[in-house]
Amino acid sequence: MIAPTRARHRLFAALLTGACICLTGQTATAQSPSLNVSIIVFSPGIPADASTHRRLQVFPRIREFESRLLPFVLRETLVATHTWGAVRVVPEPDPAAELYLSGEILLSDGRTLALRFVAVDASGRVWLDKSYTQLATIDLESRRPASGIRAYQALFDEVAQDLHAARALLDDKALQDIVQISLLRYAATLAPTAFEGFLHRDPGGRFSINRLPARNDPMLERIQRIRHVEYLMTDAVDEKFQELYAEIASTYAVWRKYRQQYAQYQIEEAAWQENRKSTAPRGSYKAIESLYENYKWARLAAQEQEHWARAFDNEVGPTVTRIESRVAELDDWVDDRYAEWNRLLGEIFELETGLGE
C-alpha cells in the first residue's frame, strides 16, 4: 500500500507546518513562466455502431492501444522544444492544469493518421481546436510508406508549432495569471470556503483573478505541498505510461507496417480492378464469376487483417493489462487522499478561523 493509514497524523502535522512556498507570479521573474502541460489519454474515436467497424477499418482494441501510445509521441515532441515546463500524460481530465490538451483519433488506417486536438489553459482560454491529417512519409529507399509511428512525426511537429504560436500571443502577465488561476482552481477543489471569492467565472466559463491570497498564506502553502505530492503521483503514472510505450512500441510498429502495406495493396488492387473490368454481359456466368473472385479476395484480405489484429492483441494485451492495473491503483490512492486532504483542510480552517468548511 502506497500510504498507510497510520500516516494520517503525520500528514495533518505536515499540513499545519512547513516551509514558505510563495504563490507563483507574486514576485517578479526575469523569465516568462514555463507552463506545465497535461495531455489526457486520447479518445480512441471508435464508432458506436459495431457493424461499421470493418467497413471503416476500425479495430477497437488496437484503437484503444493507439489512444495510449500517440499521446507519448506528442509528449516527446513538446519536451524536445524546451518551451514548456513538465509535460505529462495523464489518465483522467485535469481542468485545473495550466495547459490541458485532449486529443481524438479520427482516422488511423496505416496510410493516413487524422487527429483532433483541443488545448485549453486554466483560465478557460482555448489555445487550439483543430484537426490534423498526415499521410505516412515515404521511405526514400523502398519508395513505400515509412514504418512505425514516426512516419507521422510531421503531424505532431505541426501541433507543437501551433501551441508555440498560441503561447507567443500572450504576454508575461497573461502567462503568470494562468499559473495563478491554475493553483487557485486546484485550491478551491480542496478547500472551497478558504478560497471562495478569489476567482471570478464569467458566463462563458472563463476564469479571472478577483484577488490573490495574502503573501505566505498558510492555507495556500498547505495546498501547494499537497499539489507537490499529487505531482509526484502523476509523475509515477506518467512513468507507467512511458513503460507501456517502450514495451509495445516495437510490436505496434509491425502492425502499422502491415496496415500500411494493406492500404497500399488496396490502392493498387482498386486500380487493377478498374483496368480489368469485365466486358461480359450483366448476369452472365462470366460476370458473376468475376464478381465472386473479387468478393473472395476481399474477404480473404479482411480475414487476414483480423488475424493480425488478434495476434497484436495477444502480444501486447498482458502488458497493457498489467500497467493499466498499476495506473488504476495509483489513481485510487490519489482519489482516497483527495477526500482525506479535503477533510483535514476543513479541520485546519476551522481551528484557525473558528469557521467550518
Image (cartoon, grey):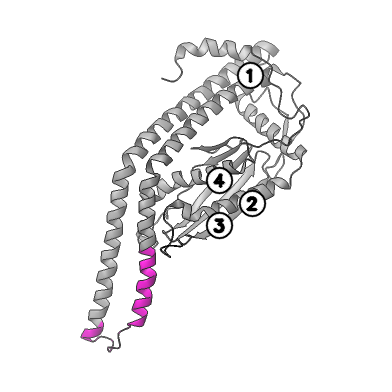
Residue 264: within the magenta? yes
Residue at which label 1 appears: 222
Give the Cα distance between marks 3 and 1: 42 Å
Task: Report the predominant secondary structure element of the magenta stretch.
Answer: helix
Identify whether 205 is placed above or below 139: above
Task: Return the mark for residue 132.
Answer: 3
Give the Cα distance between marks 1 and 2: 36 Å
Quadrant holding the N terminus:
top left
Residue 323 lies, in percent from the top left, at 39, 34
Circles 2 and 3 in contact, beta carbons < 8 Å:
no
Circles 3 and 1 in contact, beta carbons < 8 Å:
no
Could you tell me which secondary element the residue under label 2 belongs to?
A: helix
Answer few, some or many: residues within 10 Å of disc 3's Cα (few below 14, many 20 plus, some between 14 and 19): some
- Say whether residue 81 is left or right of residue 52: right
The image quarter in which residue 328 lies: top left
Answer few, some or many: residues within 10 Å of disc 2's Cα (few below 14, many 20 plus, some between 14 and 19): some
Residue found 54% across the figure and 10% down from its top: 10
Could you tell me which secondary element the residue under label 3 belongs to?
A: strand
Residue sitting nearer the eye, 109 or 355: 109
Residue sitting nearer the eye, 356 or 345: 345
Residue 186 lies, in percent from the top left, at 62, 30
Q: Earlier in the sequence, mark 4 or mark 2?
A: 4
Residue found 35% across the figure and 77% down from its top: 272
Query: Type of residue at label 4?
Result: Thr
Residue at which label 2 appears: 162
Residue sitting nearer the eye, 4 or 166: 166
Residue at which label 4 appears: 77
Answer few, some or many: residues within 10 Å of disc 1's Cα (few below 14, many 20 plus, some between 14 and 19): many
Residue 336 lies, in percent from the top left, at 48, 24
Q: Which residues are magenta?
A: 262-287
Identify whether 69 is placed above or below 259: above
